């Protein structure tokens, strides 16, 4: 895998336009989804994803296959940029009812879904997104990377540059905290 | 096993990463604690929902913008660009540039030496003496062409000079003719005046 990653990066650095396009299409999905989870804004997520790829393109030479997989490196660059944006726009963090959700194009929604199903999907997405927004940044990040993006513990540890044990701990606390938040939002009993 | 310890082990328990002894202890606690059992169910359901979370689609326009801002869009390439040019591209790199240039110079010289008679080409024509003879012949051809051009230039110059003389000669003739004619007419008029009687002149004056 290291060889494949290094070869792809080398091709991009040599100006192979098709290799670069393949690179973009491979990682753009994960990046834009991660950015959207953080920002709750589709337009901002799109902008951030563009910025991430521009930054990656300018810094392709800094990729080191020995330090981890290309995916981890890409997501780390993306995550740092998204976090920087998130911190600088903390006050504007949306809690619930993001208008962007109404214009968001859900890639996973089947085209044959009925209007009711589409509405249900959107409401579910909005509900979960609202719950995630109430978590602390570290816990939210751990949940996003593990349960939404499907990264392994080791990959998350590489991306966040923290021990794997810390990753597990954050994921565990994040899940429990999110479950409590959603329960509160549903109007259920608060666990002591 | 207490509730706080259970929460710490919850994710590992759900991921099946606990050893049998600890797993059994957690299972026993879940069976006996309604709150922890409810929490386990909520977190399990939550993970299912998160796994089924609708993803945002990647807009094609964004990919195109990124490509334009970096390397640009890959253009559709025809046969020449897709196959022929890439085959010769290594020859244009810095490493092979000098060798490529020398090959080009040699080929152009060889073609020039062969001239139009490709069928008459032989390796003996590439010998130094043959090349010198070829060069001499080319020089003579060029010099003959120059002489021919020079002769033509002189001939044209001479023709033009004669033409000029002829033209000016004709002009002079016509000019003299006009002047002479004018002079003749004035002389004839004076003669007519001299032949007219005096009484006729007086009558003309009184009138």
Image: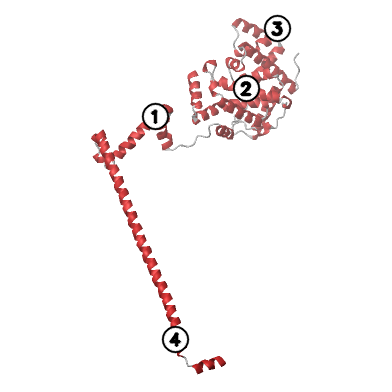
Residue B174 appears in which quarter of the rendering?
bottom left
Crowding near the residue tagged with mark 1, few <14, some 14–19, many ≥20 C-alpha atoms within 10 Å: few
Secondary structure under tag 4 reads helix
Looking at the rendered image, the disc whose residue lies closer to the viewer, 3 or 4, is: 4
Looking at the rendered image, the disc whose residue lies closer to the viewer, 4 or 2, is: 4
Name the N-terminal-most of marks 3 and 4. 3
Name the N-terminal-most of marks 1 and 4. 1
Disc 1 and disc 4 on one polypeptide chain: yes
Q: CA distance from mark 3 to mark 4?
A: 160 Å
Crowding near the residue tagged with mark 3, few <14, some 14–19, many ≥20 C-alpha atoms within 10 Å: few
Circle on res. A171:
none
Disc 1 chain ID? B
Q: Which residue is mark 1?
A: B98
Q: Which residue is mark 3?
A: B2
* Residue at the image position 67 percent from the left and 10 percent from the top: B8
Disc 4 and disc 2 on one polypeptide chain: no
Label pair 2/3, CB-CB below 8 angstroms: no
Tell me where residue B160 appears, x and y as whole percent. Answer: 36, 60
Q: Which residue is mark 4?
A: B191
* Residue at the image position 72 percent from the left and 18 percent from the top: A180
Q: CA distance from mark 1 to mark 4?
A: 99 Å
Q: Which of these two is toward me, A115 or B200?
A: B200
């Amino acid at each position: 895998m290291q060889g494949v990653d290094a070869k792809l990066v080398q091709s991009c650095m040599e100006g192979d336009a098709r290799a670069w396009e393949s690179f973009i299409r491979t990682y753009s999905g994960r990046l834009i989804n991660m950015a959207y989870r953080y920002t709750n804004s589709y337009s901002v997520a799109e902008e951030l994803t563009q910025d991430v790829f521009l930054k990656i393109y300018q810094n392709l030479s800094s990729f080191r296959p020995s330090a981890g997989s290309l995916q981890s490196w890409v997501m780390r660059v993306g995550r740092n940029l998204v976090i920087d944006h998130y911190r600088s726009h903390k006050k504007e963090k949306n809690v619930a009812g993001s208008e962007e959700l109404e214009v968001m194009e859900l890639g996973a929604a089947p085209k044959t879904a009925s209007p009711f199903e589409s509405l249900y999907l959107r409401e579910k997405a909005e509900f979960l997104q609202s719950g995630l927004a109430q978590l602390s940044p570290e816990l939210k990040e751990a949940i996003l990377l593990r349960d939404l993006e499907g990264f392994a513990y080791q990959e998350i540890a590489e991306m966040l540059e923290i021990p794997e044990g810390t990753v597990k701990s954050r994921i565990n606390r994040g899940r429990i905290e999110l479950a409590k938040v959603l329960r509160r939002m549903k109007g259920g009993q608060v666990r002591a | 096993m207490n509730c706080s310890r259970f929460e710490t082990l919850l994710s590992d328990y759900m991921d099946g990463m606990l050893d049998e002894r600890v797993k059994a202890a957690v299972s026993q606690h879940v069976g006996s604690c309604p709150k922890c059992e409810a929490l386990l169910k909520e977190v399990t359901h939550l993970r299912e929902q998160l796994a089924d979370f609708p993803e945002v689609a990647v807009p094609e326009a964004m990919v195109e913008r990124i490509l334009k801002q970096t390397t640009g869009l890959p253009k559709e390439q025809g046969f020449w660009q897709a196959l022929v040019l890439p085959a010769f591209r290594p020859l244009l790199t810095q490493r092979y540039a000098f060798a490529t240039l020398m090959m080009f110079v040699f080929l152009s010289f060889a073609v020039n030496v062969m001239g139009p008679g490709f069928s008459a080409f032989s390796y003996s024509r590439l010998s130094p003496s043959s090349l010198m003879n070829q060069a001499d012949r080319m020089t003579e051809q060029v010099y003959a062409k120059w002489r021919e051009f020079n002769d033509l230039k002189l001939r044209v110059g001479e023709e033009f000079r004669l033409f000029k003389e002829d033209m000016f000669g004709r002009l002079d003739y016509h000019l003299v003719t006009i002047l002479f004619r004018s002079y003749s007419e004035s002389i004839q008029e004076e003669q007519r005046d001299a032949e007219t009687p005096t009484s006729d002149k007086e009558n003309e004056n009184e009138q």
